[in-house]
Amino acid sequence: MNPRTITLHDCSFSTYIYEEEIIARILMLAEQLDQEYADKKPLFLAVLNGSFMFAADLMKRITIPCEISFIRLASYQDMQSTGKVKEILGLNEDIQGRHVIVLEDIVDTGHTVHGLLQQLGDRGAASVEVATLLMKPECVQHPLDIKYVAKAIPNDFVVGYGLDYNGFGRNLRDIYKIVS
Ligand code: IMP
Ligand code: MG
């Protein structure tokens, strides 16, 4: 496939992970979760906004009984993590005794997931795991145990497939990386 270059705000991005690869990786993740959570009736908690496409494509491929709910957290300012984690909004479910799987678009420094896991920790869930579409292992600043990673990437800023650059680019079918 020919690489494609786009401009969002003041930055250029070029195609990096094509839709076909994204979907193939999500299918593998779905099969793994189907096996490991059979009979556990997991509750997926998708972190908005970034995970909306990942959550939708993953859920379509999960075949075991499960629930999904959507939560919202601190937003990302420009290209740098602010390091501050806001409280969880929109968690109306009682997670007591539930097997929870947090769905994230990307784990960068890990501040967001770390803060989220701390807040979920005292709510009595039977288990809490994280499934993320992307992860930047070089950037993680917390001792996190992320069990489900669809793809690990280097420390490049990416957009598309739910991920944004200052609000734009979420609608792109492929994932693009910033042109350096
Ligand atoms: P962390 O708290 O540093 O791990 O960052 C997590 C959040 O920052 C993610 O949920 C994204 O919303 C955002 N983020 C991190 N890296 C990128 C990127 O490369 N592109 C777009 N958003 C990103
Ligand atoms: Mg996010």
Image (cartoon, grey):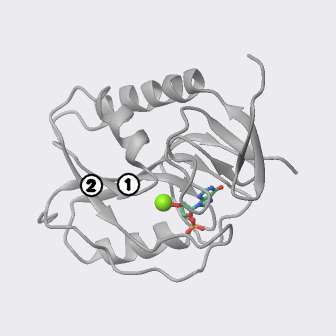
* Residue at 27% across, 55% down: 100
* Residue at 21% across, 64% down: 125
Q: Is residue 149 left or right of residue 31?
A: right
Asked whether the viewer can see residue 89, the reply is: yes
Q: Are marks 1 and 2 in contact (CB under 8 Å)?
A: yes
Query: Could you say which disc has been placed on residue 129 in the image?
Result: 1
Res. 120 image quadrant: bottom left
Kind of residue at badge 2: Val
What secondary structure is marked by label 1? strand
Callout 1 crowding tier (Cα within 10 Å): few <14, some 14–19, many ≥20: some
* The one of 125 and 90 positioned closer to us in this rendering: 90
What secondary structure is marked by label 2? strand
* The one of 170 and 74 positioned closer to us in this rendering: 170
Res. 66 image quadrant: top left
* Total residue callouts: 2
Asked whether the viewer can see residue 155, the reply is: no
* Residue at 70% across, 45% down: 153
Q: Is residue 110 above or below residue 30?
A: below
> Earlier along the polypeptide chain: callout 1 or callout 2?
2
* Residue at 67% across, 49% down: 158
Kind of residue at badge 1: Glu
Percent across and percent down for residue 172 are 55, 37
Query: Could you say which disc has been placed on residue 98 in the image?
Result: none
Percent across and percent down for residue 113 are 47, 66
